[in-house]
Image (cartoon, grey):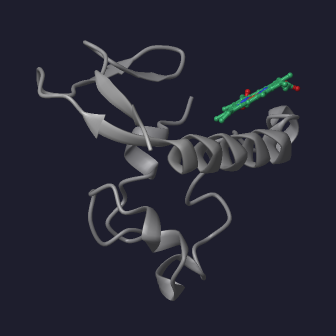
Amino acid sequence: MTSQWAVHRLPKSFRDERFLPERWLNTETKDLPRCATFRFGAGPRVCIAQSFAMMETTILLASITQRFEVECLPGPEILPCATMTLDRRLGVQVLLKIM
Ligand code: HEM
């Protein structure tokens, strides 16, 4: 077993733990070792849908953000919950407003 939670937060790979999607657009993450992130696993059991999932997610996010304004509603603190995949303990409520 390997912990994505721990490996994806190693200070030697990432300068901080904040959610910074733009870190993937700049040179900060360009020279990371191959398994510094392994969202889709690695080795012989790697996810067979890795490319599909990345494309699907990009299209989904682009489609949603073109049509809706997404507002995070006030609620309980967002707490991680370790299951087969990383989940949120109490969910996250958002409001979608048609643009
Ligand atoms: C963001 C979406 C996804 C993530 C983060 C993800 C992640 C993973 C991970 C971590 C594994 C396990 C690798 C291991 O055992 O070490 C896996 C395996 C697998 N995934 Fe995904 N996955 C995603 C989407 C999908 C989709 C959409 C499909 C199918 C349409 C899929 C099909 C599979 C299959 C069949 C395996 C088993 C591969 C094997 O054991 O040989 N995944 N995935």
Question: In the depicted view, which residue is nearer to us: 36 or 54?
Answer: 54
Question: In the depicted view, which residue is nearer to us: 94 or 3?
Answer: 94
Instruction: Give the image quarter of residue 35.
Output: bottom right
Q: Is residue 19 above or below residue 34?
A: above
Of the 4 image quadrants, the one containing the N terminus is top right
Question: In the depicted view, which residue is nearer to us: 48 or 51?
Answer: 51
- Residue 18: x and y in percent read 27, 57
Tell me: 64 left or right of 75.
right
Q: Is residue 82 above or below residue 65?
A: above
- Residue 59: x and y in percent read 71, 46
Instruction: Give the image quarter of residue 44.
Output: top right
Of the 4 image quadrants, the one containing the C terminus is top left
Q: Is residue 22 above or below residue 78?
A: below
Instruction: Give the image quarter of residue 81.
Output: top left
Residue at (47% x, 36% y) in the render: 3
Residue at (21% x, 28% y) in the render: 78
Q: Quadrant of ligand 1?
A: top right
Q: Residue furthest bottom?
A: 27
- Residue 61: x and y in percent read 59, 45
Tell me: 94 left or right of 26.
left
Residue at (84% x, 35% y) in the render: 49
- Residue 98: x and y in percent read 44, 36
